Image: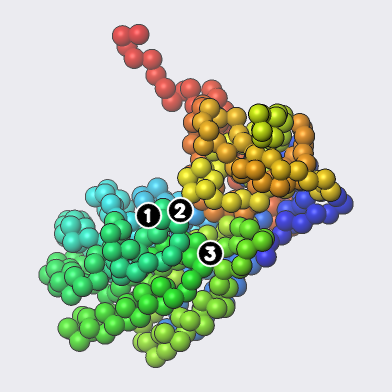
Amino acid sequence: MDHFDIRDGVMHAEGVSLAALAAAVGTPFYCYSSATIRRHYQVFADAVAGLGDGDPLVAFAVKANPNLSVLATLAALGAGADVVSGGELARALAAGIPADRIVFSGVGKQVHELEAGVEAGILQFNVESEAEIDMLGAVAARLGRVVEISIRINPAVDPRTHGKISTGGADAKFGIPWDRVPAAFAQAAAHPGLRPIGLAAHIGSQLFDLGPVEDTIRRLGTLAQEMTAAGHTIKRIDCGGGLGVPYRPDQPLPPSPADYAAMVARVTAGWPWRLMFEPGRMIVGNAGVLVSSVILTKDGASKHFIVVDAAMNDLLRPSLYNAWHDFRALAPRAERRVATIVGPICETGDTFAEDREVEAVGAGDLVAFMTAGAYGATMASTYNSRPLVPEVMVNGDAWAIVSQRNQPAAMLALDARAAWL
Ligand SMILES: *Cc1c(COP(=O)(O)O)cnc(C)c1O
């Protein structure tokens, strides 16, 4: 469910007309609905409340949408954060997410990032390799701190999602193969500054099938029992994120948070450990749209092209994953036609949709790419020297620019002319 509805003939985000926003800030821009973000967080948090030791932690996966106001919206609801870089850690802390609700994941954390996490006093590091155990052990020793870690396992399951967002297969770069967990725990326990207290997994994104997730959580439980028997004190089990969102109205729905929580409840019944969850996409995916204008339409030899002012640098998912984003006119049109929707960038990959039946739009019309709140603005680049687009957040009848459009002059200011030129 989201809060993007047609009112008085034009798409609104909650109480704010997207056409009015377009007039105020120009296109393209991202717009987020804070009511939708709050609702999705609450639905998820309510679904998992009481599981495990009764005090689960929902740590929003910051990489899905790291905007400070998005994080602050979630912080106000008690969310934690799953960060994968020093930059994300800084954003989560700046947004007011307490350090003891922050978990640091990632396959290649650098020493300065490990130090930043240790100094901030975050809840735990999810460690993904034997080498990282020794790196973090050295950092903890140098800083004179004791750090709690979970071992992220590679469960060797097929999450049955798009290959580029599958992270749980045996040959994925993520985690430590599950059969090496006992050795990894022993290695960590030998570091005076490390306490191996948990197990973690995250098998992929846009998951529609709960079976592989269930197998993975069972595996975490079995390993936690084995590590307890081996004399370690297990405190937390991190189930990761990955729940899918509906991008296409004509396709079956992903499992709901209630379906997911029912599965977790069944698998974890009687577990004494604190459970952690790292949802990203399902919290923010449907809470954002990318608003754009049609620059012109043109007819090729056989295709009808709609050329919009947004491009692959603003919303990469269609080029990167062949992802589907619904394309709608802000002012609904009865007439429909088959079109190929492209941006202005000089790449054939700059295509949002190919030969899709959409509302018939023409030059100057305002349009929206739906379900763009996750992995949207955060993947943007300035390719073709296109400025990063602004992000706007709506709250009821109020709105605010929560990330500025950067200007061509600001981009140029980062460059320098070499002394010999
Ligand atoms: C990306 C990621 C998530 C979030 O995945 P979603 O599909 O957005 O829910 C959670 N945990 C880790 C470790 C991740 O890398």
* Residue 190 located left or right of residue 283: left
The answer to whether mark 1 and mark 2 are in CB contact below 8 A is yes
Task: Please identify the quarter of the rendering in which residue 277 is found.
Answer: bottom left
Residue underneath mark 3: 244
Give the amino acid type for the residue marked by disc 2 in the picture.
Answer: Lys
Residue labelled 1 has its Cβ within 8 Å of some atom of ligand 1: yes
**Does 260 sit above or below residue 175?**
below
Nearest to the observer: residue 419 or residue 338: 338
Q: Please name the residue shown 48% across and 81% down the image.
A: 263
Instruction: Decide if ligand 1 comes within 8 Å of the CB at mark 2.
Output: yes
Residue at image location 58% in from the left, 57% down from the top: 285
Ligand 1: does it lie within 8 Å of the C-beta at label 3?
A: yes
Q: Which residue is mark 1?
A: 84
Q: Whole-percent x and y of residue 320?
A: 47, 45
Mark 1 to mark 2 CA distance (whole Å): 7 Å
Q: Residue furthest top?
A: 421
Amino acid at pointer 3 = Gly
Percent across and percent down for residue 214 are 41, 77
Of 329 and 223, the residue lying toward us: 329
Q: Say what secondary structure mark 1 lies in.
A: loop
Question: Along the polypeptide, which appears first: circle 1 or circle 2?
Answer: 2
Q: Quadrant of the N terminus?
A: bottom right
Asked if one can make out residue 39 in the rendered structure from this viewpoint, the answer is yes
For the residue labelled by badge 2, is the local secondary structure a helix, a strand or a loop?
A: helix
From the viewer's side, name the closer residue of 212 and 2: 212
Q: Label 1 neighbourhood size at 10 Å, few (<14), some (14-19), many (20+)?
A: many
Image depth: mark 3 or mark 2 in front: 3
